Image (spheres, grey):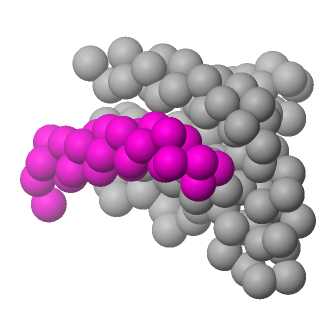
Amino acid sequence: MDINKQIDYWKKSAKHDLDTAESLIKEKKYDWALFLSHLVLEKMLKALFLKEKEVFPPKTHNLIILLKKVGIEISEDEYDFYEEVNTFSISARYPDEQFKFYKLCTEEFTVEKFNKIKEKYLWLKKKLM
C-alpha cells in the first residue's frame, strides 16, 4: 500500500465532501449537508491515522474512536461536539431518525455546525502538512 496515495485519497475525498456540503446548504438540503460534513471529519481523521500509524485506518464512522486512535486529546466541549457530529451520520441514514433530524436541521443550526466542522477540517488539514 502506498501510504501517501492513500492519505491523498482521504484528503481529496474530504475536500470534495466539504464542497458538496456547502452546495447542499445553498440548496437548503440541510440534513444531507450535515451528513456529508460528518464524512469530512471522518476522512480527515482517517488520513491522519494513516500518516501517524502507517496502516489502514479502522473501519468505523465514530469520530471519537478515530480521535483516540490517532492520539488527539480533546476537551469536554470538543468531545460533546464530536459526539453530536457522530449523530449526523446515524440520523440521516435510518428512517426512524430521519424525520426528527430533518426537523432539527434548520438553516441556523446547519450553518453553525457546518462552520465548526469546517474549522476542525482546517485544523486537521494543517496537521496533515
Q: Residue, x 71% and y 45% (percent of image)?
A: 85
- Image quadrant in which you'd find residue 62: bottom right
Residue that sits furthest to the bottom in the current view: 95
**Front one among 60 and 104:** 104
**Front one among 81 and 30:** 30
Residue 7 position in % (x across, y down): 24, 44
Depicted 114 relative to depicted 6: above or below = above
Q: Is residue 13 highlighted in magenta? A: yes
Q: Residue, x 26% and y 18% (percent of image)?
A: 129
**Front one among 84 and 28:** 28
Residue 95 visible (yes or no): yes
Identify the main secondary structure in magenta.
helix
The quarter in which the N terminus is drawn is bottom left
Residue 33 position in % (x across, y down): 56, 50
Q: Residue, x 36% and y 39% (percent of image)?
A: 19
Q: Residue, x 78% and y 43% (percent of image)?
A: 106
- Image quadrant in which you'd find residue 51: top left
Residue that sits furthest to the front in the current view: 27
Q: Which residues are magenta?
A: 1-30
Would you say 9 lies left or right of 107 here?
left
Would you say 113 lies left or right of 28 here?
right
Residue 72 visible (yes or no): no
Would you say 15 lies left or right of 100 here?
left
Q: Is residue 14 highlighted in magenta? A: yes
Would you say 12 lies left or right of 81 here?
left
**Front one among 28 and 112:** 28
Q: How many marks?
A: 0
Residue 115 position in % (x across, y down): 60, 24
Depicted 84 relative to depicted 126: above or below = below
